[in-house]
Each structure stands twice: as structure tokens, then as C-alpha cells.
Amino acid sequence: MARPPKDTATRLIEVIAAWEALRPQKVFYGLTCEEFKSAVKPFMQARAVVIDLQARLQQAIAERQRSLEDAKKLLLGVLSAVKGDPGEGEDGELYAAMGYVSQTQRHFGSKLMRQEK
């Protein structure tokens, strides 16, 4: 049965381990084992950073998902309060500045669309 393909980092680790254990003083491809380890160190360090960042990204995504419903509830509550505030309302400047279409714009927009037909 064929061995499954391994990633480069796994191969590097295996090669270094075998080289150190069986032929630590032998030079291959013009490199000692220590020189080889030094040469592949940037790759291994970058790989470790990527693994760490991937784990941190997954944690951040999970945290975002856990807090999403609370954020939505708070958003809807604030929007309802702005719409219900006598000094602001659904037709006010604040509501429009928050990215929502005011009642007047909605009314005139739909009226214009009917006239254009």
C-alpha cells in the first residue's frame, strides 16, 4: 500500500531526524545537517506563523458567531428606540445617517417609481 503524500514540513522533520540519528557527520548536497536545518528554518518559522494565524482566525470567527445574536438584538433595540423617539423618528436625520431609508424617502421613492411606469 502506498504511503499518503506528506507535506513538506513533515518530510523536512523526518529527514532531519533520520540524518541526525544515522549520519550526523555526513555532508549531503554540500550541506551538513546543521546547515540544512539553518537553511530550512525560515520556511519552518513561516509555517508556524501561518498555523498560529489560522488557529487565531478560527477562534475569532467562533467568537464573532457567539456574539452575533446579542449584537443583532442590541441593534434592533436601538433602531426601534430611534424610530420611536419623538425628537428623532423614522423620518429623522439620525435614522437616515444610520444608513436607513427614511419614511419620506420611501414614500416619495415608491411614488416616483409608480409615476415612471
Image (cartoon, rainbow, N blue to C red):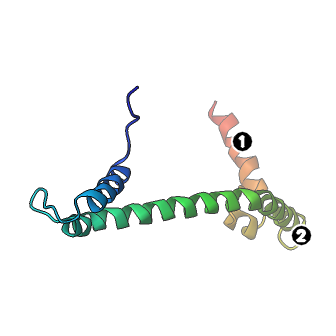
Which amino acid type corresponds to the residue marked 1 in the rendered image? Ser
**Between 35 and 68, the one nearer to me in the picture:** 35
Residue 46, percent across and down? 36, 64
Residue 107, percent across and down? 76, 48
In terms of secondary structure, where does tag 1 sit? Answer: helix
Q: Tally the numbered discs.
A: 2
Number of residues whose C-alpha sits closer than 10 Å to that of mark 1, classed few (under 14), some (14–19) or many (20 or more) = few
Distance between the alpha carbons at the discs numbered 2 and 1 = 25 Å
Q: Can you name the residue that lies furthest to the front here?
A: 22
Q: Nearer the viewer, mark 2 or mark 1?
A: 2
The residue wearing badge 1 is 110
Looking at the image, is mark 2 or mark 1 earlier in the sequence?
A: 2
Number of residues whose C-alpha sits closer than 10 Å to that of mark 2, classed few (under 14), some (14–19) or many (20 or more) = few
Q: Is residue 114 above or below residue 18?
A: above
Q: Pick the quarter of the image with the N terminus.
A: top left
Position of 38 compared to 115: left or right? Answer: left
Question: Would residue 102 be visible to someone looking at this image?
Answer: yes
The residue wearing badge 2 is 85
Position of 72 compared to 25: left or right? Answer: right
Which amino acid type corresponds to the residue marked 2 in the rendered image? Asp
Question: Would residue 89 be visible to someone looking at this image?
Answer: no
Seen at 43% across and 64% down, the residue is 48
Seen at 80% across and 57% down, the residue is 69
In terms of secondary structure, where does tag 2 sit? Answer: loop
Q: Pick the quarter of the image with the C terminus.
A: top right
**Between 5 and 65, the one nearer to me in the picture:** 5
Seen at 82% across and 65% down, the residue is 74
Position of 30 compared to 5: left or right? Answer: left
Q: Is residue 110 above or below residue 40?
A: above
The numbered mark at residue 74 is none
Residue 105, percent across and down? 71, 53
Seen at 59% across and 57% down, the residue is 58
